[in-house]
Image (cartoon, grey):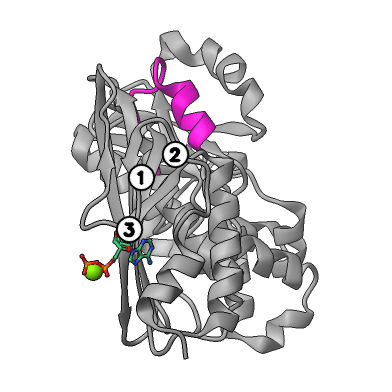
Amino acid sequence: MMGEFNLINKYFVDRQAQRKDVILAAGDDCALVEMPENVSIAISTDTLVAGTHFLADAPAAWVAHKALASNLSDLAAMGATPAWVSLALTMPEPDEAWLAPFCSAFFDLADYFGVQLIGGDTTKGPLSITLTVQGFVPKEQALRRSGARVGDWVYVTGELGDSQAGLDVVLDPNKSTKPFAQELLYRHFHATPRVLVGQAMLPYASAAIDISDGLISDIQHILTASHVGVSLDVDALPLSKELIQFVDDKPTAQQYALTSGEEYELCFTVPEEHKGAVDTATAHCGVQVTCIGQIRPQDHFELHASGEPLDWSVSGYDHFKES
Ligand code: ADP
Ligand code: MG
């Protein structure tokens, strides 16, 4: 069995090109980095625990992607540009058959976004992964949850609901024979953090959040922080054709889109005067953005489907099943 230091050196040290602002990466007691001028540093930490956030037998490469993507998604939601990441890894024993694919997927995604691993910690214990990502955002321009105003338009990136369908397949092997089950399972682990959209919307969006707990739940954070309400058009929710076939019908797919967590799509609000800029600003980002509603005064929470108001709190899931 490999010792801790050999393991760190083999798998985590000198795996990437050195960023100019990294003076010292892994190897000493601390990493040393240089702060650029006129930016704030955006910092976020997330932990993934085996058995809670992924099953212990999930492919290591998929777990690595999910761990880093979910962290980068938090930077994306602030409009920040990723720069540095540290990794605290706890594993029952030094398992090289797990570490090799984990690291290769981790560094693939890190390299794609130009984020450098600058340090971490490696300990023995139940499998868990804690990442701290840091990025830059121009001073006073970060996209917060608190900036939405009445009349602003509500947008989401990508398609919603696929991640929940993939999770269904993880949790119920019987579902693995449903249409597109394997594709949706793959998507659950392979979200693309919407870093480019976050950056592109910096001059235009009034508020943003990434969808980690489900649209309905996460948009509440914007509403609470901004002291506003919302009206959402359920028919406008972007759905993949794979999801619709997997769940059999559109209303159920819409239900998934409203509640699916770990999507790592962005939800952002845009004032009327910037509505015309959204498509052009995001054209180079390689992902669709869809307007799904509008900000209303505080305490208004309206959902519409087929032109009819939908009382979410009363009818919830059942309404969708029956319609
Ligand atoms: P210390 O005892 O000072 O905490 P460690 O033995 O934990 O030092 O780590 C030695 C060096 O290796 C440090 O620079 C640390 O940042 C780095 N390191 C340890 N584990 C990891 C990891 N999983 N990924 C990246 N760097 C790591
Ligand atoms: Mg340590």
Above or below: residue 180 compared with residue 270: below
Separation of residues labelled 2 and 1 (CA atoms)? 7 Å
Q: Which mark is residue 110?
A: none
The amino acid type, in three-letter code, at marker 3 is Gly
Within 10 angstroms of label 1, few (less than 14), some, or many (20 or more) residues? many
Above or below: residue 322 compared with residue 4: above
Quadrant location of residue 145?
top left
Above or below: residue 140 compared with residue 157: above
Q: Nearer the viewer, residue 186 or 147?
A: 186
**Are the residues tagged 2 and 1 within 8 Å (C-beta)?**
yes
Within 10 angstroms of label 3, few (less than 14), some, or many (20 or more) residues? some
Q: Secondary structure at mark 3?
A: loop
Name the N-terminal-most of marks 1 and 3: 3
The residue identified by callout 2 is 267
Q: Secondary structure at mark 2?
A: strand
Q: Residue at x 45, y 26 (%)?
A: 199
Choose mark 2 or mark 1, whichever is in front: 2
Q: Which mark is residue 219?
A: 1
Q: Residue at x 54, y 19 (%)?
A: 278
Residue 7 placed where, x, y %?
44, 75
Q: Nearer the viewer, residue 259 or 162?
A: 162
Q: Which mark is residue 27?
A: 3
Choose mark 1 or mark 3, whichever is in front: 3
Q: Which residues make up the magenta segment?
A: 195-210
Q: Secondary structure at mark 1?
A: helix
Name the N-terminal-most of marks 3 and 2: 3
- Quadrant for ligand 1 reads bottom left
**Magenta-drawn stretch contains 207:** yes
